[in-house]
Amino acid sequence: MDIAQIDFQQLRIKHILYKSKVRSFLYGGTFDAAFFSSAGPIDVWFTTVGRVRYASEPAISSLARLHREMNSLALELYTLYSNGNIDQAHEGLKSVEMKSDQFIELLSNLDKKLQQK
């Protein structure tokens, strides 16, 4: 396994954890504000690995943008949930799932592309 595969596997795992955290707070778990901030593990990955090692890959910018969109959506869902709009917040989880699918597909395509080099 080369370094890119390891890096992308780490990002994939962080992303799965991210989705789990969103689902968790929408179903009564504790909201981890630091996790959903710019100091969260995915943002840190982009800052320390993604934009350092893979800066020349346009997909990295697209992945970072998708994550920012997901994070904004997650924060909106948290606000809805906190204000008692639980059903509406749960409904918004579908949008998170769609963006997550896009994220994973883009990440997989980038991983395959770099393996072929």
Image (cartoon, helix red, strand yellow):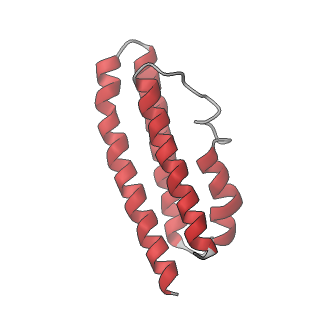
Q: Quadrant of the N terminus?
A: bottom right
At x 63% / y 57%, what residue is drawn?
Answer: 46
How many numbered callouts?
0
Up-down relation of residue 60 to residue 20 (above or below): below
Q: Position of residue 52 (x, y in %)?
A: 69, 67
Report the side of 106 relative to 15 (left or right): left
Looking at the image, the residue that sits furthest to the bottom is 117
Quadrant hosting residue 55: bottom right
Relative vertical location of residue 73 with respect to residue 7 in this rendering, above or below: above
Residue 94 horizontal/vertical position (percent): 30, 38
For the point 43% across and 13% down, the residue is: 83
Foreground of the two, 75 or 12: 12
Residue sitting farthest toward the front: 1
Q: Is residue 92 above or below residue 28?
A: below
Q: Nearer the viewer, residue 11 or 34?
A: 11
Q: Nearer the viewer, residue 78 or 109?
A: 109
| Residue visible at 33% across and 32% down in the picture | 92
Asked whether, in this view, residue 29 is left or right of residue 7, the answer is left
Q: Is residue 83 above or below residue 11?
A: above
Residue drawn where x is 48% and y is 85% of the image: 116
As rendered, which of 27 and 106 lies closer to the eye? 27
**Rendering quarter of residue 27:** top left
Residue 73 rendering spot, x and y as whole percentages: 43, 37
